[in-house]
Amino acid sequence: SLHDALPICGGRCMAVTNDGKTLFAGTEGGQYVYRISNLNYVNNNLDNSGTNYNLTTISTPITKVTLTFPGESGQVPTSISVDPSDNNHVVVTFGNYVTGSNHHVYRSHDALSSTPTFVDITGTIPAMPAYSSMIDRWNSNTILVGTELGVFASSDDGATWVYQTGFPRVPCLMIRVVAQYSNGLPADDIYIATHGRGLWKSTTLTGINNISQKQIATLNIYPNPVHDALNI
């Protein structure tokens, strides 16, 4: 079973690619991050015997890859974010204070490759645990990271970071985006869960999809009826 492929330890964080085929999972006991692939081959008909089915025996087996993070010092993985528009773009954060070391935020642009590489993008974020992360679905270069002392934002894929002064200096344990419509336009609200200061909401840290509205009094199209292509 899939459970047999993972170590016996507590799950800490996880994220699934937009197509549902790949799971990234971070564990607490072993302090590892795994990539579990080919989940789309799992279905309810695999096991009719009532016992655990060995997923490694199917024609396209479920596979597990242990991911590596250069410089990371056995810290606990705290969050995993997959870019909604690019399954290869993944951000992973780590907790713990490590003396003389500051490796808490990593990014990959080839997370689905046979040999995925993650680079440290902690940069100017101070040496402290990072607990949560988010990649903006409208702009993949925008990344949010929740830390021990508030939220940091990057608009250049982690090359530089800006501390969000409008947010309290508290541990930010979870970042979630709720997609909805505002005034007829697609928009995202960001919710951040903190330790001790409750739940916060922002509509400014990530961009509303900028689609302009313009009322058109008359619109002529041809040919009519239309098939495959039309002229306006």
Image (cartoon, rainbow, N blue to C red):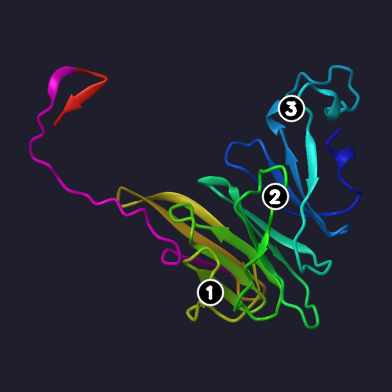
- Is tag 3's residue or tag 1's residue first in the polypeptide sequence? 3
Which residue is more in the foreground, 219 or 231?
231
Q: Secondary structure at mark 1?
A: loop
Residue 95: image tag: none
Marks 3 & 1, CB-CB < 8 Å contact: no
Residue 42: image tag: 3
Query: Which quarter of the rendering shows the N terminus?
Result: top right
Which amino acid, by three-letter code, is at mark 2? Pro
The residue lying furthest to the front in this view is 115
Position of 90 relative to 21 (above/below)? below
Which percent across, then down, holds residue 25?
Answer: 75, 50
Residue 161: image tag: 1
Give the prevailing secondary structure in the magenta stretch: loop
Left or right of 80: which side holds 218?
left
Left or right of 75: which side holds 218?
left
- Residue 32 sits inside the magenta stretch: no
Q: Nearer the viewer, mark 2 or mark 3?
A: 2
- Number of numbered discs on residues: 3
